């Protein structure tokens, strides 16, 4: 019996690209190899349903991507690129945004700002808003308002059986619970609605650390950040760049350390918070009033494609001395190494009334590392190294955080490490009912291990 043709989909209106056809797959992540048998770019929910039905008929695993920040390597199967479904509608009366799965945070924040509103977006404006929200979504404003996923209103989802489902706390509470933190385990989101907040400015700044000793800097940061109010968000960034050709001269062979602060408090409260940092930072920069749509400029995340692999651990506290113990690894001569220490807590500790599967809500800090690997680096070796580093930085490691797992490290950092045991069992049961044949192939691996 001949296998049905896999390179055409009846009724599909968007572009279809077969493996080996001209044209690369655009992606922010260049440290992985993505070679699907078929790539489709749907224009609407009907296209998504047709693509999933096509894959199911032919036994092709289905993966989903928008910007590619969360991509891992894959070979074969059907890849759904949702970037063409980028519609955005803002309702200023209800303070709700409705977006397609291809919308980025830059696009959403700009649209919301026209109405004096702001979403719980991240530090990088090029990230897809839907994927970020499905993974939980830690915003610079999350200590004040909670996770982005906590503020989902409803969504439309094509499940592996090809059905378009409307999911909300009223219409499908079980799937809605899972959608708040389970990533791409349930299907392909074609529309998402979430709450916005009446914010016209945030006091924000990047404060250069003036202490050379990273362990001392991290210890001082942890002590200071333990006492900040809920209207303040912060993280410490420690970056080491090797002396290698190809790196910009301004960072080549350099180490940088920065404390990033955002505040929704008054001007005097913001001044007091910076003053409390004492001799840790150069306080002359201070915190400047910043429109939410311009907030990502403060964090200066990479705007173009680049290689990166990352791990992250939620924890009750930071073992700062680990930065000294691991200095030779953190200052590698053949690759950039970045360490970030985020203050969690505040409203992130409180689950919404409808519940969610987001884990580690009682964690106070997040320790994470990003490596910029070269072609000769083995992802498995880097994964083991990063696992040791985030564990050594963590006092009482609580578990991983889905949105900060990057690249081909899922053997060490699988998705199920991100959830409480009872929630994981519930999620596995839900995904087994939604996807009994194992059609979906999420980037971070299936929760049931298939």
Image (spheres, helix red, strand yellow):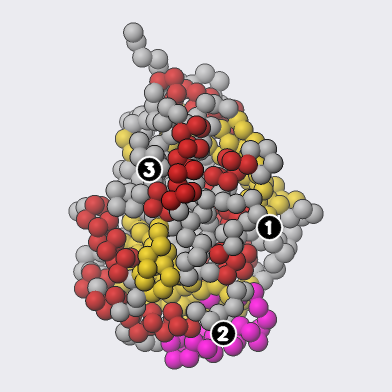
Which residue is tagged 1? 196
Q: Quadrant of residue 167?
A: top right
Where is residue 66 drawn, in percent x and y?
49, 44
Where is residue 346 drawn, in percent x and y?
57, 70
The answer to whether residue 203 is above or below residue 189 is: below
Q: How far apart are marks 2 and 3 (CA)?
A: 41 Å
Which residue is tagged 2? 273
Nearer the camera: disc 3 or disc 1: 3
Please give the name of the residue rendered at 42% of the width and 84% of the height, measured from the top-left corner.
220
Residue 100 in sight from this viewpoint: no
Contact check, label 1 and label 2, Cβ < 8 Å: no
Tell me the SS state at disc 3: loop
Residue 414: in magenta span: no
Please give the range of residues in magenta: 261-285
Residue 268: in magenta span: yes
Q: Which of marks 1 and 2 is nearer the N terminus?
A: 1
Rate crowding at label 3 as few (under 14), some (14 to 19) or many (20 or more) other CA atoms within 10 Å. some
């Amino acid at each position: 019996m001949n296998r049905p043709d896999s390179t055409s989909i009846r009724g599909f209106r968007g572009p279809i690209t077969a493996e080996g056809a001209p044209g690369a797959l655009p992606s922010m992540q260049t440290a992985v190899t993505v070679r699907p048998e078929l790539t489709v770019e749907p224009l609407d929910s009907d296209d998504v349903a047709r693509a999933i039905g096509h894959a199911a008929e032919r036994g092709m695993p289905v993966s989903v991507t928008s910007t590619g920040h969360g991509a891992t390597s894959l070979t074969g199967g059907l890849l759904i690129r949702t970037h063409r479904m980028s519609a955005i509608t803002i309702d200023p009366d209800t303070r709700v945004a409705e977006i397609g799965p291809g919308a980025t945070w830059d696009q959403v924040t700009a649209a919301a700002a026209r109405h004096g509103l702001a979403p719980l977006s991240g530090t990088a404006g090029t990230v897809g808003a839907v994927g970020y929200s499905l993974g939980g979504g830690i915003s610079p404003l999350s200590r004040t308002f909670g996770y982005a996923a906590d503020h989902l209103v409803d969504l439309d989802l094509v499940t592996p059986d090809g059905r378009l489902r409307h999911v909300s706390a009223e219409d499908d509470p079980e799937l809605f619970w899972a959608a708040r933190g389970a990533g791409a385990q349930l299907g392909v989101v074609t529309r998402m609605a979430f709450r916005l907040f009446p914010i016209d400015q945030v006091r924000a700044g990047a404060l250069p650390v003036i202490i050379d000793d990273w362990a001392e800097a991290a210890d001082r940061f942890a002590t200071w950040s333990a006492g900040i109010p809920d209207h303040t968000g912060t993280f410490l960034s420690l970056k080491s760049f090797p002396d290698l050709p190809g790196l910009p001269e301004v960072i080549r062979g350099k180490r940088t350390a920065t404390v990033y602060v955002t505040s929704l408090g008054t001007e005097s409260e913001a001044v007091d918070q910076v003053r409390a940092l004492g001799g840790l930072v150069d306080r002359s920069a201070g915190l400047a009033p910043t429109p939410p749509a311009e907030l990502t400029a403060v964090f200066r995340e990479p705007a173009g494609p680049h290689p990166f692999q990352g791990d992250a651990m939620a924890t009750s506290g930071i073992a700062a001395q680990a930065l000294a113990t691991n200095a030779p690894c953190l200052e590698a001569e053949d690759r950039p190494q970045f360490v970030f220490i985020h203050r969690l807590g505040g409203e992130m500790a409180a689950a919404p009334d409808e519940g969610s599967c987001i884990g580690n809500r009682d964690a106070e800090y997040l320790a994470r590392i990003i490596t910029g690997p070269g072609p000769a680096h083995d992802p498995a070796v880097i994964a083991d190294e990063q696992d040791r580093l985030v564990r050594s930085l963590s006092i009482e490691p609580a578990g991983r955080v889905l949105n900060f797992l990057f690249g081909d490290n899922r053997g060490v950092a699988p998705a199920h490490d991100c959830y409480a045991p009872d929630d994981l069992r519930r999620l596995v049961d839900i995904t087994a009912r939604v996807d009994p044949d194992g059609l979906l192939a999420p980037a971070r691996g299936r929760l049931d291990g298939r």
